[in-house]
Amino acid sequence: MTSAEHLSITKTSTTVSLGLRLLCFLGLLLSAVALYEHVIYSRGLATGPSFCNISSRINCEAVNASAWSVFFGRPIASYGLFFYTSLLGLLTLARKREDSAAVAASSVAFLASFIASVVSLVLFAISHFIIGALCLICIGLYAVNFLMLGTLWAGNFRGRALLGLMTGAQAIRSFVRAAFSPNGGSARKGLFAVALVGLASALAPELVYSVASRTRPVSTGQPIQDAVNRWKEQRVVSIQSDLSGGAFSDYSIGPADAPIQIVEFADFECPGCRVLYARMHEILKKYEGKYRFVFRNFPLDQECNPSIRQEFHRYACLAASFTRCAGEQGKFWQALDFVFTDPVMTDERTTFDVRGFLTEQASQTLGLDREAMDECMKSRRYYQKLQRDIEEGTRVGLQSTPSVWINGKLVERPTTETLEGVFEEILRKR
């Protein structure tokens, strides 16, 4: 006789069982959405902000761009698919089993939801304190885990939670032993089913990528035209840029009288900014001589941005200062390209010496005078310029990074397709 049969833990009620299965199904849906978002943004199938990019604080892209979104080479969402599918299958099968099997399944579910809740707390702490951004989908999954734990505790394990956890662990151990015993045919089938779910969950990112890369529309004509129409309806603002060419002026590329006048405000650690940089500068090659591009800084870093009240992008001000200092040696645009594309400027690091990296390795790579760069960055002489950029961005209504104005009009949710549509509209009218 097993411990599950000895313990006075009641069988999960029909109402509680239904509630748990609904929560598992909700968790499965949220995990699928999270996996889809991770794949399309991490593998370059989408540009511009996602629906979960609400602010610098609530930003799924920032979470997906961090090293913490992957565990043993698989997105965290893949583990969610495995967890909720396995638990849903267990609870569904347990409805028709005898009392002892149902009690064991209830205990396993209690143990699993307890572990999931602890993991949720750890992941929330990582997002809040290390990444500096929260993912709404992830928060939804955390809520599902805590609701499952609370439902099981209230329905079966009130006052005997430790006993339930121990029973769950023993039930899992008994199941594994039975699967490898000579007469454990049913258990082996169950273990095989779990293994299949695990394999499918591990391969899910590749499946999502394969399907999304074939079916996800790059953009249809109407959405592009709608975006262009929204740009046309924007009010024209006058962005004050200093293009005199001095050390504290704004850097620009292209003729002053070009028909397409672009001003971008960006942050070097912003995932959306990094994606847009790579894509936009590819399409700009098609419009050589027809645009002037002005780059402005808007670092989301409390070191030089007074509107940021807590630690967020810890090295954004430092990186912006690095590019300005490189500009003293005539290599602003090379430095800009370096910090926008080198992985050191993602949110993956914790105690990495970014200042030392930029001063030494980056300076050496770009052929910069290291001592001059070290002196310039320590002097912080460009911080006032960065603050003027921040003030100007705030004045013209900047709400998020990246923000792009073309001919004085804001481009909402800038993507390469939208930008190219606006470019063509301007040139067509000429």
Image (cartoon, rainbow, N blue to C red):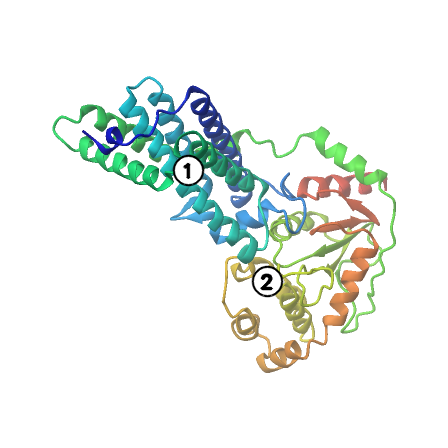
Q: Is residue 190 left or right of residue 240?
A: left
Relative vertical location of residue 60 with respect to residue 224 in this rendering, above or below: below
Residue 243 position in % (x across, y down): 82, 65
The kind of residue tagged 1 is: Ser
Q: Is residue 71 left or right of residue 299?
A: left
Quadrant location, the N terminus = top left
Looking at the image, the residue that sits furthest to the top is: 96
Find residue 325 and report its image quarter: bottom right
Residue 55 position in % (x across, y down): 68, 48
Which of discs 2 and 1 lies nearer the camera? The answer is 1
**Can you tell which mark lies on residue 158?**
none
Relative vertical location of residue 239 with respect to residue 192 in this rendering, above or below: below
Residue 351 position in % (x across, y down): 49, 67
Find residue 18 and report its image quarter: top left
Q: Residue at x 34, y 35 (%)?
A: 198
Residue 170 position in % (x across, y down): 25, 37
Front-most of residues 364 and 208: 208
Q: Is residue 308 visible?
A: yes
Quadrant location, the C terminus = top right
Which residue is identified by label 2? 339
Q: Residue at x 44, y 33 (%)?
A: 207
Circle 2 sits in a helix, a strand or a loop, which is it? helix
The kind of residue tagged 2 is: Val
Looking at the image, the residue that sits furthest to the left is: 182
Q: Residue at x 53, y 74 (%)?
A: 356
Q: CA distance from mark 2 to mark 1?
A: 42 Å
The 10 Å Cα crowd at callout 1, few under 14, some 14 to 19, many 20 or more, is many
**Can you tell which mark lies on residue 113?**
1
Q: Is residue 202 visible?
A: no
